[in-house]
Image: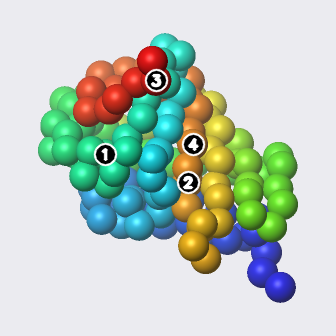
């Protein structure tokens, strides 16, 4: 039998490696679509496909560079609910400058599901509000 919490955490770890290396394919490989995010401003963002999600990837990378970002770290990752097909991970993440200082620390909740035999994130809710908020999404009516 597999360990859903371990598999969800591994999927998250791979997503974060992709995010930090700005590897859109690595990130998408750890996601399920449609993908939803409840933003720090309480707007529900929906990406129906991987292509929608990555359509503004270069713009997001540029905005990250403009704010002095070099990487994102997870200071805390804990499963708060789980079953064999779904895991809720709560995290505290920090954006890091080149001098190693933290400049944006925020809480977030990610819901991972096993779909077609593969773990990936389906929904995120974050308290992050900053210049890198995506604009390439649909919203729920």
**Circle 4 is placed at which residue position?**
123
Q: Secondary structure at mark 2?
A: strand
The quadrant holding residue 10 is bottom right
Residue 74 placed where, x, y %? 57, 48
Q: CA distance from mark 2 to mark 3?
A: 19 Å
Residue 88 placed where, x, y %? 73, 48
- Residue extending furthest bottom? 1
Q: Give the foreground label among 3 and 1.
A: 3
**Mark positioned earlier in the residue sequence (3 or 4):** 4
**Circle 3 is placed at which residue position?**
140
Q: CA distance from mark 1 to mark 4?
A: 13 Å
Task: Please determine whether, in this image, residue 60 is positioned above or below residue 74.
Answer: above
* Residue for point 37% across, 21% down: 130
Instruction: Using the image as rendered, state which of residue 16 and residue 30 is in the foreground.
Output: 30
- How busy is the neighbourhood of tag 1: few (under 14 within 10 Å), some, or many (20 plus)? many
**Mark positioned earlier in the residue sequence (1 or 4):** 1
Circles 3, 1 touching at the beta carbon (< 8 Å): no
* Residue for point 16% across, 37% down: 59
The quadrant the C terminus occupies is: top left
Circles 2, 4 touching at the beta carbon (< 8 Å): yes
* Residue for point 64% across, 55% down: 112
**Circle 1 is placed at which residue position?**
53
Color theme of the render: rainbow
Task: Please determine whether, in this image, residue 99 is positioned above or below residue 87.
Answer: above
**Circle 2 is placed at which residue position?**
121
Instruction: Using the image as rendered, state which of residue 69 and residue 42 is in the foreground.
Output: 42
Q: CA distance from mark 3 to mark 4?
A: 14 Å
Task: Please determine whether, in this image, residue 90 is positioned above or below residue 41.
Answer: below
């Amino acid at each position: 039998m597999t360990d859903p919490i371990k598999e969800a955490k591994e999927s998250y770890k791979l997503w974060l490696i992709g995010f930090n290396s700005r590897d859109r394919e690595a990130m998408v490989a750890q996601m399920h679509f449609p993908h939803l995010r409840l933003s720090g401003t309480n707007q529900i963002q929906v990406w129906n496909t991987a292509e929608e999600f990555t359509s503004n990837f270069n713009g997001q990378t540029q905005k990250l560079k403009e704010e002095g970002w070099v990487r994102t770290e997870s200071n805390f990752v804990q499963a708060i609910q789980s079953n064999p097909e779904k895991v809720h991970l709560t995290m505290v993440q920090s954006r890091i400058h080149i001098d190693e200082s933290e400049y944006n620390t925020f809480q977030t909740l990610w819901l991972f599901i096993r779909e077609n035999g593969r773990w990936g994130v389906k929904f995120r809710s974050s308290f992050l509000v900053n210049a890198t908020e995506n604009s390439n999404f649909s919203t729920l009516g």
